[in-house]
Structure formats: structure tokens, C-alpha cells
Amino acid sequence: MVTTSSSQKFDSTEAVQFLNSCVSFIKNFDSHVKSYLTSLFPIAQWISRYNFTWFTGDMIAALTVGFVILPQALAQAKIATLPPEYGLYTGFVGLCVYAFFATSKDATLGPTAVLSLLTSQLLISANTDKNGNDIYPKTMFVITLAFLTGIYQVFIGFFRLGFLANFIPATVTDGFTTGAAVTIVIQQAPSLLGITGIETNRQPIYLALRDILVNLPRVKYDAILGISALFLLIGLKTLKEIVGGRIKWIYWMGIARNGLVLILYLLISYFVAKAYPDKQIFMIVGTIPSGLKVPHFPNLEAELINRAWMPALTTTLISVVEHIGIVKAFGRRFGYTRNVNASQEIIAVGFTNLLGSFFSAYPATGSFSRSAIKAASGVRTPIAGLFCSVIVIIGIYTLTGVFYYIPNAVLAAIIIGAMSELLTTYRTFIEFWNISFLDFLVFVVATFTTVLAGVELGIYISVGLAAFIILLRLSRPKVLALIHLSTLNKFEVSEPESLEVLNGILVVRFSESITYPNSMYIGSKLLELVHLKTIYGGVPRKPDDRLWFDDTEERAASRENRRTQISDSLVTIITEDTESKSISKVEIASVLKAVVFDFSAVNVFDQAGFNVFLETRDEISRYAGRPVYFYFVFVKPEIKRNVIRLIEIPFSAQTLSLLKQQLEDESVLFQPTESDKLFFSSLEEAVAEAFLGSERVTFALKTAELTEDDISEIDLVVDSTDTILLT
């Protein structure tokens, strides 16, 4: 019997939809371009509504953040092993540029601890020769690094590739920030204690820790300032958290603790220096040039670009992940997640770095601590960043002379005190463990590789591991067998060992879409379930008639020998009045007759999945020795067409040849494709139709010997299709 299937004809539905979309885009090209260009400057959409209330909130936030960013910028430039003024340059540009491109009111761009640490490590790995000497001046290298980072980020943002950041899970971000925090604390310990001569950047951090412990007897007076400043910072923060909600002046002291501590110890250092003019009691920052450098084009020598382009990819990755995490966190907190556009935020960071390179800035991104302070200060719009940049520029031009007396130990204390905000909390640590062990593993790997191998290698290893786990989950979805619980009148997942495929109907649910990465795995797991829990009913074949690896019949016979003898288990049909009635005796393991697929989690059913389902249908039908019909529940409208095509395609020639040997009526080789016989809105309906369809096939078998009880059972099902559920 030869049937011409509609599935063999061209179906132009998707092609027509695609062409229509292209035509529509071309017709409205001007409006699309205008809309795109407008979206690049979100400030244009709301600046006309700016008012005095917003101005007041923005100004308070700007003053608060400005008081915080000055000491932090100096400290973070120290982490990057750069002169302190470069932290100020970076802070100024980040605050100034971000306001024009921002979709978040709370995010604050500038130098950060993690990116500064990465910068210091890249200066060693990419800008030193075999003898450990700098090939290019550090400042020249980081400016070019910022330029290339900005180019990459603007490219990503312009082409709206911000969704790629979603593939980096929070476990990676938390892991490398925790590792970076540990590394920074160890690196700053010598400055905190006044110990000189310890290399903390060019050797593994565990060796640096060893050298610090060995040199503890060399602690100097700086330790008095550093340790006391650290305890004061911790005390002010703790007071803010305990009583800040009730006593406002303590709350604001806690917010401004870095600036207050810096001023206090700057005065102490100043008076000590005046008291002992001929003796340096404490190590201090020293001279900081006043004002901004003259804007200049970054050095783009071929050799410098060759050394910086790969490290710039790393800074791009870190800064994007940090910043997107911050804007999403504050968007959720204050209810404007819908307004946050990841691609637009990447453009904002990109232009900050690109333009910043002309003002001698090094790579910048969003700062969580300053963003939190900005949010807590009542910021209303992104314009607060512009106001704050004015405060920074005033500091650059007027306060650099005062910064001369800042003790290095106090800067180290400010850095170490800020690391508590980067450390993953115990509660989050427990959450990672409880929710997913693989996610917890990614966090641990990210933390330890960052500490032991550096931020650059740590981020690549942890991102690689996270990507591997994502691919593993996509390619190894769960294929869940379901059983019906008569007492609860619902289907539940069953472990394969305890699954009973009664009346030959297997119910299966998938946890993912069926696509090329996972289709082969899904097919093999489905076959495994069929082989494990149903009886071989195919035509016995000689070894000469089978492929060299085909031992299906032998394995089936072995399983049958291990199975318990046919039990007197009963099929129970749940009637409308919920009374149970025993009607027939069946085997716990029976020949497979139909498969019901729960497609509730399947959003994509591509060509690879389509082909695997065809092959699987052939294989399990040959194994069962009869046509096995497929039924589908909760199928999405966009994939119904593919499912219908699947059912319309006949069995392969080999399968047809084997099945025809066992059929009296060959019409059952073709499953009905009417929607009401193929697609269902509940598992109960699908199982009922599967039972009826399988019995039609049973009637067509040459070996069919139906008793009166069998016929009465079918009649009972027809009379009460909503009660055909199996226990």
C-alpha cells in the first residue's frame, strides 16, 4: 500500500512568515532606524519631565556618593598598581558618561576592586618581559586596554548581544568576586601592617601569604593606623546595620565611613609629619598631580594592540558580568526591571571605557558598593551621576594637595573593609548547596581558581565549567515516566525501577525542548524505558537476518527470565463514583501498545528531534511487533505542524515489512492525524484515546484472540472514557 503523504510536500508557512517579516522591516526601515537611535539615549525620553523633587534626590545622592568615591578611587588605583590619580580620572569619566546612556538610576560606574585586581594581573601577564620588566609604561598599557575594552563593549551593545550575559550564572559571578576579595585582602595586608619588600602581585597568592606570615616580626607603626582604621570602619558599618534604622546620624556616618575615616587619619598623619619633619613615621601616598590630564588619543601601536587585545576580552567579560548583575539586582529591588536593557547598559559601559581612554582612565564598570549607597541616598534619576562627577572634578583640582598625607595603611584598611561586600554570604553559600550541587561546584571552582590562579584564569575556567554544565543539561534532559495515582487522580513521576506499564501504555514527560543537542539522548532513553519495562513482541529473527550488533532479542529474553512470574495484579478502572472494580488479569510487563508524550516543556521540536522520533517510532514498533501509536499532550501551537508531519510519514520499508507479517488489516499501519485523535489538553484524555487506539490495532493482529471479557472491557472504556486511568 503506497500513500502519498502531505509531509513530503513543501510547507511554506515558516518561509512566508520570515519573508513577510523582512518585507515589513524594509518598508519601515526609517522608523526602525529612528527608534534604534533614540533607544541609544534613554535620557531623551524622560529629561523633559525632570523636576525639582527629582533634582533634590539626585543632589543628595551625588553628594553622598562623591564623598565615598574619592577615597575609594584612590584605594582602587592602588589595587591596580597604578598612581592614585588614575582612580580619580576613571571615577570622573564613569560618572559623567553613564548618565546619557543609562537605563538604571542606581548603578554607579567607575573603578572597582575586582576589575582593578584584574588590571594589575594583566599588567604582569601581558606587559612584562622574561625578566619581569614592564614592556610599556603601565599607564600607557591600561589606557589602551580601556580603549579596546570599550570597542568590544560598544560592538556587543550595538548589535544587541546583551543576552549573552545571561549565560554566565550567578555562581560564577559570586565565585570569582569572593576569590578576588580573598586575593585583595592578602595583597593589601603588607600595606596595612607597614611591611615592605613583599611581592604580592607577581607570585602566587599562597606564597605571598607565606611571606607575610614569615615577616610579621617586621611590622611597623603603620599597623597602628591600619588596624585601628579597619576596626573603626567595621564598627561604623556594624552600628549602621544595628541602630542605623532608628538613629539617622549613625546611619549617615555608616554610609560615609570611608570618607570620615580617611579625613581622621589624614589629620593624624599630617600632625605627625609636622611634629617629626625629619623622620617618616608612616608611609604616605605622596604627591598627586592636580587637575585632569590633557585629553589625548590612546597609543595604538601594532605591538601594543597585539599584547592588549586578548586581555581586553577578559576585562570586557568581567565588566559586563559585574555591571549587568548590579543593574538587574537594583532593578528587581526598586521595581524597574522592565526598563533595564542589558544591551543598552553594555553600550553605556562601552562608551565609558572608550571615552575614558582619552582622559587617561583605566577599565571601569559598575560598583556594587557605590550603587548601594546611591540607592540608599534616595537617587531619582541617572543624572545624579553628572552631579557627582562635578564633585569628583572639584576634588581632582582642589584636594590633591591634601591627599599627599593619606597613609597607605589607611587606604589598605579602606580596601580590606570594602571586601566584606564582595564575599558571598553564608546564606547564599547554603542556597547554592541546597538548590543544585553542580551550581555549588561552579562556585567553589570559581573561588579557588581565582585565588590560586588569578582572576583571568579563574573567570575562564569557571565560565567554561558553567558552559559545560549548561550544555550537559541541554543535551541530557530528563525523560520522565509517569504513573497514575488513583487515590489522588493525577499523574506523578515514577522511578524506572518501580514503573509499571499497564495495558501497554507508556506515559512520558520531557524536561526540555527536543533539539539537535539532546535528540539522540532522548531517543536512547525512550528505547531504554521500553526495553526495560515492556515485553518483546516482535517477529523472531535469525542472527543472519540482523545487524552484527543487534542483540535485542537475547537481551529481552534475559530480562524475561529475571522478571517475576506473571502476577495476579489487577487493572483497576476508577469509575465516576470513585469505586474500584476488578475486571481482568494482566501481566505487570506487557507488550508496548502506545506512548503518550507530555510536551508541556517542549518549546522547540527541530529537524534533529523530528528524525529521532521517526527512528524511535520504527524501533519500538519493531520491538513490540505491532504499530505503536504516539499521542501528544500540551503541544505548543508552533510545533503542532511538525508533530502532524511526524505522524503522517509512514513507517520505514524494513519496519513495514516486519509489521505486515503480523497484521490482518494493514490500515492500522497509518495512525489517524485528526487533532481530536492526536492532540489533547490532559493526560487522562490522551490515555483514554491511546487505550482505544491500541485496541483497534489489537483487533487487526493475526494473533488476536479476544475474549468476551476483553470486548466488555473495551465497551466499558467507551462508556466512561474519563475513567480509563491505570493504577
Image (cartoon, grey):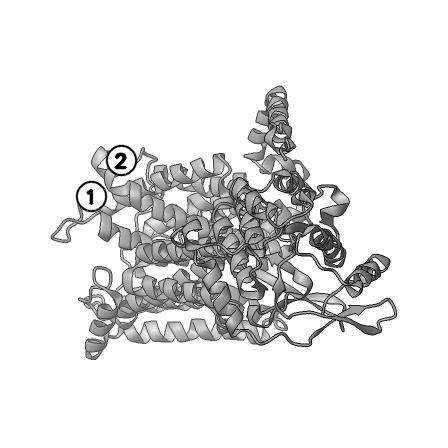
Kindly tell me whether residue 226 is visible in this rendering.
yes
Q: Secondary structure at mark 2?
A: loop
Q: Secondary structure at mark 1?
A: loop
Q: Is residue 667 left or right of residue 534?
A: right
Q: Find residue 99 and report its horizontal and vertical position in percent.
A: 53, 42
Q: Find residue 534 and report its horizontal and vertical position in percent.
A: 58, 63
Q: Find residue 568 and report its horizontal and vertical position in percent.
A: 69, 76
Task: Give the residue drawn at x 47%, y 75%.
Answer: 235
So how many labels did they put on this image? 2
What's under tag 1, amino acid-wise? Answer: Tyr
Kindly tell me whether residue 263 is visible in this rendering.
no
Q: CA distance from mark 1 to mark 2?
A: 10 Å
What's under tag 2, amino acid-wise? Answer: Asn
Dividing the image into 4 quarters, which one contains the C terminus?
bottom right
Task: Give the residue drawn at x 61%, y 21%.
Answer: 23
- For residue 136, the mark is 1
| Picture quadrant of residue 655 | top right
Which residue bears the numbered disc 2? 299
Q: Please report contact status of discs 1 and 2: CB closer than 8 Å, yes or no.
A: yes
The residue most toward the top is: 27
The residue most toward the right is: 577
| Picture quadrant of residue 450 | bottom left
Task: Give the residue drawn at x 40%, y 48%.
Answer: 317
